Amino acid sequence: MVAIVMTASVAAAQAPAEPPAPPAAPSAATPAGAPAAPAAVTPPLTRSLTTKAGLLFNTVRPERVADFETVLWYLEQALRQSTDPTVRAQAQGWKVFKAVEPGPNASVLYVFVLDPAVPRADYGLGRILADAYPDKVQEIWRLYQGAVSSGGSLLNLAPLELKAPAPLTPPATSGRPAAAPPARTPPPPPAR
């Protein structure tokens, strides 16, 4: 899913405006001269959180780790140098970790820990990279697409607030006195 989402972000940032689609021929359902229904507008895809903390997992092909880490270097620089207040706020809580253990199918797992996160901000790499590197984004994006082995998983995290449980009550007895625990006998002395 990450690749699809990020590809859409990069494409939206780089693609020239599409020419308007030619009008559709009237159909039997649309009387001649009646205006055609407007095409549905698809909102741009984003990677956003609805909570103040989250995780984003990226699985990377082991032979393409260097490419992925190159993309991460560009991302770190983009976050650090951005003048956009939202991106600067995102950078404050964006930490990148690499799993020591192998991931699924011997992949290398990278975890973005977003804490504190900026709720509803776009965490898609494509937009951030496109804003920072308009002339290089296509080459950076090729590295990214070749490195990831599958889409990423985004998790919204909510803090867990534990409440004191109700007092524990002993199990109900059947009217008989509780049996005493069995007496412990010491182990036999070691044989000589």
Image (cartoon, rainbow, N blue to C red):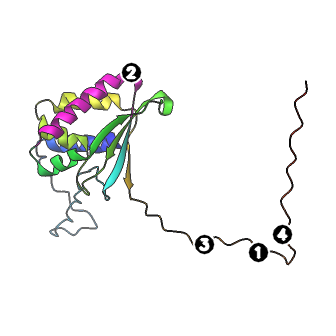
Q: What residue is pinned by disc 4?
A: 178
Q: Nearer the viewer, residue 113 or 138?
A: 113
Residue 99: x and y, percent?
Answer: 42, 33
Q: What residue is pinned by disc 2?
A: 63
Comes first in the chain, label 3 or label 4: 3
Q: Residue at x 91, y 27 (%)?
A: 191
Q: Are marks 4 and 1 in contact (CB under 8 Å)?
A: no
Comes first in the chain, label 1 or label 3: 3
Q: Residue at x 41, y 24 (%)?
A: 62
Q: What residue is pinned by disc 3?
A: 167
What amino acid is found at the position of numbered circle 4 in the picture?
Ala
State how far apart marks 2 and 3 are (Cα).
55 Å
- Looking at the image, is mark 4 or mark 1 nearer the viewer? 4
Q: In the rendered view, would you say 147 is above or below 38?
A: above
Mark 3 neighbour density, 10 Å: few (under 14) some (14–19) many (20 or more)? few
Q: What residue is pinned by disc 1?
A: 172
**Residue bounds of the magenta highlight:** 59-82
Q: Residue at x 21, y 62 (%)?
A: 26
State how far apart marks 3 and 4 are (Cα).
21 Å
State how far apart marks 2 and 4 are (Cα).
65 Å
Residue 52: x and y, percent?
Answer: 30, 57
Q: In the rendered view, would you say 11 is above or below 31?
A: above
Q: Are marks 3 and 4 in contact (CB under 8 Å)?
A: no
